[in-house]
Image: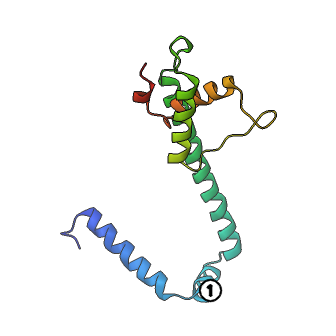
C-alpha cells in the first residue's frame, strides 16, 4: 500500500470499511457501540442533529447564492414591456416546462394585469423565462 497514492489508499480503506459494515448485522453493530461505551440511540440522535445542521447550512448557502444571482440580473423595464398577451404566453410556457412552479391568487379567482406583469418579472429574475426571451 505504500506505493499507492493517498487517494487510492483511502479508497481501499473505504471499500474495506463498507464491506465490513455490509457484513455486520444491526444487532452486531449495536453491540460494538455498547462495548465501546457508546449509547447507540444517543449516537443516532446526535448524528441526526448533525446531518440536519449540515443540510440546513447547505440550503442556506444555496438560498444566499440564489439571492445574489437574482440581484445581479437585470429587471425588465416597464417602459419596454411586452404586450400582455406575450407575457401570458411566456408565463404559460414557463409553467408548462416546469410543472413544480405554482402561483396563488391574492383576491378572487383571477390575477390582475399587474399581477401577471410582476409574475413575468419574477420568472425572468428566477431564470424560468430566458433573458433572451426578454428582447424588445
Q: Quadrant of residue 109?
A: top right
Q: Is residue 21 above or below residue 111?
A: below
Judge from the rendering whether residue 45 lies leftward or rightward of residue 131; answer left or right: right
Residue at image location 53% in from the left, 46% down from the top: 96
Q: Position of residue 135 (x, y in %)?
A: 41, 22
Q: State left or right for residue 30 relative to residue 1.
A: right
Q: Is residue 62 above or below residue 41?
A: above
Q: Is residue 58 shown left or right of residue 48?
A: left
Q: Quadrant of the C terminus?
A: top left
- Which of these two is toward me, 91 or 60? 91
**Would residue 39 be visible to someone looking at this image?**
no
- Figure quadrant of the N terminus: bottom left
Among all residues in the image, which is located at the extreme left? 3
Q: Tell me if residue 79 comes above or below residue 50 in the rendering.
A: above
**In the rendering, at what x and y percent does residue 52 appear?**
64, 56
Q: Residue furthest front?
A: 85
Query: Which residue, given by chain and number where applicable, does mark 1 sit on?
Result: 31
State the image quarter where residue 15 is shown: bottom left
Helix, strand, or loop for circle 1? helix
Amino acid at each position: 500500500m505504500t506505493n499507492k497514492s493517498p487517494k487510492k489508499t483511502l479508497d481501499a480503506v473505504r471499500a474495506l470499511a463498507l464491506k465490513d459494515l455490509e457484513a455486520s448485522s444491526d444487532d452486531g453493530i449495536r453491540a460494538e457501540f455498547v462495548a465501546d461505551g457508546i449509547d447507540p440511540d444517543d449516537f443516532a440522535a446526535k448524528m441526526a442533529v448533525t446531518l440536519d445542521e449540515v443540510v440546513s447550512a447547505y440550503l442556506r448557502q444555496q438560498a444566499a447564492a440564489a439571492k445574489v444571482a437574482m440581484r445581479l440580473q437585470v429587471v425588465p423595464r416597464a417602459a419596454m414591456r411586452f404586450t400582455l398577451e406575450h407575457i401570458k404566453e411566456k408565463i404559460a410556457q414557463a409553467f408548462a416546462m416546469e410543472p413544480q412552479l405554482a402561483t396563488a391568487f391574492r383576491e378572487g379567482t383571477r390575477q390582475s394585469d399587474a399581477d401577471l406583469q410582476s409574475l413575468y418579472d419574477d420568472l425572468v429574475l428566477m431564470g424560468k423565462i430566458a433573458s433572451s426571451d426578454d428582447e424588445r
